[in-house]
Image (tube, rainbow, N blue to C red):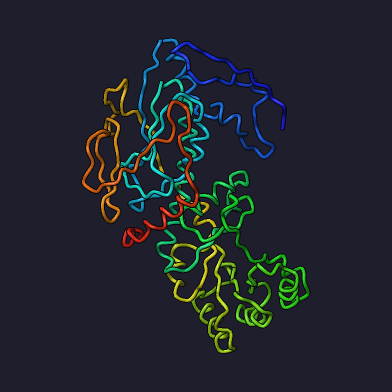
Amino acid sequence: MRDVSFSVLSIPDPLQPSRKVYQPPPPDLLCMGRFATVDDDTVRSGECTDIYFVRTEEVLRRSERNPVVAMEVTASDLPLGWAVFCGLDDVLSLLEGIPLTVDAMDEGTIFFPGEPVLRIEGHYLDYARFETAVLGLLCHASGIATAAASIRCISGGKKIYSFGSRRQHPAIATMVERAAWIGGADGVSNTAAPPEVPLVGTMPHSFVMCYPSPEEAFAAFDKYAGPDIPRIFLCDTFCDEKRESLAGARSGAQGVRLDTPRSRRGNMRAILEEVRWELDTAGYRDVQIVLSGGVTRADIIAYRDIVDTFGVGGAIANAPVVDFAMDIVSIEGISCAKRGKKSGTKQVWELQEGRHILLPSGQPGPEKGIPLISGYISDGMIQKRPSLSEARGRLLRSLSQLEGRSG
């Protein structure tokens, strides 16, 4: 990576941002990573933003305008009627040290259309240019977590593994797997996942093809793989799926994985039923079936009665983002919003059975209601950090309340 030096200025003028501002590098020294990625310092300095925020800052300063504003992040349209809030931890890292107040829902919280998931309050010039990054961090992570949660809802209790990090830029693999885990995936495949997230995986077709036959590949794996690694063998490399599955079972398989390309599948239901029949009649009733390879929500619904585990790729990792917007709801303490948005800061209260009610901030909540928005940053100081395990636990406890809403 090129060595780029930044000069840091402390600006006391109230019409200037209170944060320390990185001077933008010359155009020929843009902070680009080797793999066409933007480095952390560039994001943290606010230099990864939409150009109209840079122009907005310039005009506001020249016209001597820098009001204290509160902005809320909401999503008006949620295809499932609900979504999972995720990405807060990165937003806190982005805004730490800037004299702002940040309130938010906890990660792993289910939210509904029009509910604020995050609120920022402070001088507008302190954070105007960060809107692009804040929304990007929340939109992407929440989309992945929502997809994982919706798939878990329809899985019929079968295990769901996130196998889709290869469908995304490797620079964001940690975020993808973290969001999938919060959303309810039982394990993830990428080694860059957070340490507390369990890694799962079997073997690639290339491994099997490095041996003269599938049987020899299975025998080698069983002999040399660590004892804690499940013996799940990939059984569709050269031959009929049921033939290789029986070979895998004879080689000590705990499970057989079918990853047959769609161009060769034919009737996948019939293939799965044949494999299950042959395993059972040969005395391998305990050998499980794992299905991967372009698995969709429709596939999970169609095969959940016969498949034990689904390896899901693009349906999680390539999930549509949650279409958040970030809008002013008050200026200098006076409620104010653009057309189509509700003015004033708000609190979301959770009622029984996971139902929510939206009320103005400061108004007493309903009896036994639980406030969902709490403080995370006060005057630039982080008050608490999201817990990955608590976020996942929160989501899992809520999923039973979503039955009938996931389609």
Q: Is residue 204 left or right of residue 349?
A: right
Instruction: Please tell me whether residue 312 is drawn above or below residue 280 in the rendered image.
Output: above
> Between 52 and 114, which is closer to the camera in this rendering?
114
Q: Is residue 321 left or right of residue 2?
A: left
> Between 327 and 260, which is closer to the camera in this rendering?
327
The quarter of the picture where the N terminus appears is top right
Q: Position of residue 149 (x, y in %)?
A: 43, 56
Q: Residue at x 27, y 30 (%)?
A: 344
Q: Is residue 223 left or right of residue 364?
A: right
Q: Position of residue 237 (x, y in %)?
A: 67, 72
Q: Position of residue 378 (x, y in %)?
A: 42, 29
Q: Report which quarter residue 15 is drawn in.
A: top left
Q: Residue at x 50, y 79 (%)?
A: 270
Q: Position of residue 27 (x, y in %)?
A: 64, 22
Q: Residue at x 36, y 33 (%)?
A: 72
Q: Is residue 362 left or right of residue 147?
A: left
The quarter of the picture where the C terminus appears is bottom left
Instruction: Please tell me whether residue 76 is drawn above or below residue 294 in the rendered image.
Output: above
Q: Report which quarter residue 401 is drawn in.
A: bottom left
